[in-house]
């Protein structure tokens, strides 16, 4: 699923998360060294790294939240994982904000600060594990380019009178797909050797985005676990999915493709 928050197809969230990770871990390391070697200058460095980490975390959270809303497939295992990822990172941000004010407004013992920062690093590591799983297993933010797939296409449309124009007749080549959002529904428009077809973007196994998968000979394969479906009738061609996917009627007329919602 290509990220909505991207720059020239590069997702912004994975780029920006490097900064709060480095700064928060650095704050913990410098404070730990200050505790071990009794050097106030190291603690001062840790203090400034906490400030930089908070700023970096807020900056990284913006594209991350946009990806959660618009890129992660709804009602999927990835959506739950993304929610856990976001809550852990938010909790970690709150923890370091608390640490910042404790350092400014009190004479809290350095060992207590080091323990709190160690907790923050542990939370950050767990959140990072979920984030890595989202990218490498669920392919969130990954723009798949299989042979003949063409450039990623996505469009938000509004149905009027139950019918909506979703593509030009020549917009897609055979085995290419396009994701459209119609009145809150995620629907894939695909072109096979038999013509155009429309089906739900929701894999019936774990909710993976079929628009991010591969299509050949009228069969679409989910990128998460390999379930395969007939794009015209929605039937299961190969598991682990056990139930088919929803399909929709399409009509080719006057050089355009229309979807009946």
Image (tube, rainbow, N blue to C red):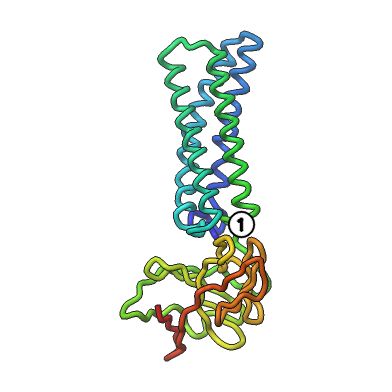
User: Percent position (x, y) of residue 138?
Assistant: 61, 56
Give the quarter of the image for residue 27: top right
User: Percent position (x, y) of residue 185?
Assistant: 42, 68
Q: Quadrant of the N terminus?
A: bottom right
Q: Residue at x 59, y 24 (%)?
A: 118
Q: Residue at x 55, y 82 (%)?
A: 232
Q: Relative to 35, does residue 193 appear above or below in the rendering?
A: below
Residue carrying label 1: 139
Q: Residue at x 59, y 23 (%)?
A: 28
Residue farthest along the front direction in this orientation? 242
Q: Quadrant of the C terminus?
A: bottom left
Mark 1: give few (<14), some (14-19) or many (20+) Cα within 10 Å. many
Give the quarter of the image for residue 224: bottom right
Q: Residue at x 51, y 56 (%)?
A: 72
In the image shown, does 112 or 202 lie closer to the viewer? 202
Q: Is residue 184 left or right of residue 116?
A: left
User: Percent position (x, y) of residue 94?
Assistant: 45, 31
In the image shown, does 17 or 112 lie closer to the viewer? 112
Question: How many marks overall?
Answer: 1
In the image shown, does 87 or 11 lie closer to the viewer? 87
Q: Relative to 256, does residue 208 appear above or below in the rendering?
A: above
Residue farthest along the left direction in this orientation? 161
Secondary structure under the numbered disc 1 in the rendered image: loop
User: Percent position (x, y) of residue 84?
Assistant: 52, 44
């Amino acid at each position: 699923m290509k990220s909505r928050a991207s720059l020239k197809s590069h997702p912004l969230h994975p780029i920006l998360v490097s900064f709060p990770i480095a700064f928060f871990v650095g704050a913990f390391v410098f404070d730990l060294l200050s505790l071990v070697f009794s050097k106030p200058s190291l603690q001062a460095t840790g203090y400034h790294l906490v400030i930089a980490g908070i700023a970096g975390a807020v900056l990284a959270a913006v594209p991350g939240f946009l990806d959660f809303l618009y890129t992660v497939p709804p009602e999927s295992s990835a959506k739950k994982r993304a929610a856990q990822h976001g809550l852990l990172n938010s909790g970690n941000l709150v923890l370091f904000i608390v640490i910042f004010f404790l350092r400014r407004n009190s004479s809290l013992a350095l060992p207590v600060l080091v323990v709190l920062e160690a907790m923050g690093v542990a939370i950050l590591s767990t959140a990072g594990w979920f984030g890595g799983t989202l990218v490498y297993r669920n392919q969130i933010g990954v723009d798949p380019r299989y042979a003949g797939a063409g450039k990623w296409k996505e469009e938000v449309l509004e149905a009027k009178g139950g019918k909506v124009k979703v593509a030009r007749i020549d917009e897609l080549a055979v085995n290419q797909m396009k994701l459209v959002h119609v009145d809150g529904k995620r629907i894939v428009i695909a072109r096979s050797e038999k013509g155009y077809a429309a089906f739900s973007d929701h894999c019936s196994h774990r909710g993976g985005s079929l628009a991010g998968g591969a299509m050949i000979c009228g069969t679409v394969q989910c990128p998460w676990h390999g379930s395969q479906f007939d794009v015209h009738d929605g039937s299961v061609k190969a598991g682990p999915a056990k139930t088919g996917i929803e399909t929709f009627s399409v009509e080719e007329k006057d050089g355009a493709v229309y979807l009946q919602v």
